[in-house]
Image (spheres, grey):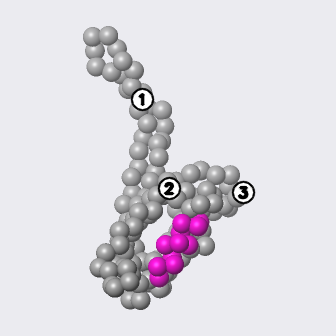
Amino acid sequence: MQLMSLGEFVFGIDDLLFNMIREKRSWRHPSADRVGMPPAYQFVGVGENTLSLGGVLAPGQLGRRAAIDEISTMASTGEPQPLVDGEGTVYGAYLLTDLDTTSSHFLLGGIALKVDWTLSLVRVFVDRTRFASC
């Protein structure tokens, strides 16, 4: 079952399943200092739109450890990727900026039974001829 795809990577129970999405939108209001008064602010436009996806990987039970490496390889290209949910809604083009993992519950030999992960993305606006539906 596909929950979402980022480029050609599909998030789902067989590969990498997320259980959290956090979105942050911002607007830019630079300040200008004034003598004897608080700063003045001016709206100059939309700021960054970031997403964080997080979940738990339990190799052999839920997902594949190699999926983390696949995401890392995609991030290393530096290319924006289209983000599409399981119903076909296109959210735009996103860059992968961070991937954090925390491994725990180790077996003998150092194999982690649990890997908590968080993926950070930032939306970018690209030439529409590149991603026709972004």
Q: Position of residue 88 (x, y in %)?
A: 54, 73
Q: Identify the disc placed on residue 30.
A: 1
Secondary structure, mark 1, is: loop
Circle 1 residues within 10 Å: few <14, some 14–19, many ≥20? few
For residue 57, what is the image quadrant? Answer: bottom left
Q: Secondary structure at mark 3?
A: loop
The residue that appears at 56% across and 62% down in the rendered structure is 75
Horizontal and vertical percent position of residue 95: 55, 57
- Residue drawn at 51 percent across, 78 percent down: 66
Identify the amino acid type marked 3: Thr
Write down the quadrant of residue 41 in the picture.
top left
In the image, the segment drawn in magenta is 64-74
Residue highlighted by disc 2:
97
- Residue receiving disc 3: 129
Between disc 1 and disc 2, the foreground one is 2
Q: Residue furthest right?
A: 129
Given the current orientation, which residue lies at the most extreme top position? 35
Q: Are marks 1 and 3 in contact (CB under 8 Å)?
A: no
Nearest to N terminus: mark 1 or mark 3: 1
Q: Secondary structure at mark 2?
A: strand
- What kind of residue is marked 1? Pro
Q: What's under tag 2, amino acid-wise?
A: Thr
Mark in front: 3 vs 2: 2
Q: Quadrant of residue 133 in the image? A: bottom right
Magenta residues: mostly which secondary structure? helix
| Quadrant including the C terminus | bottom right
Q: Residues within 10 Å of mark 3 (few under 14, many from 20)?
A: few
In this rendering, would 15 be left or right of 34? right
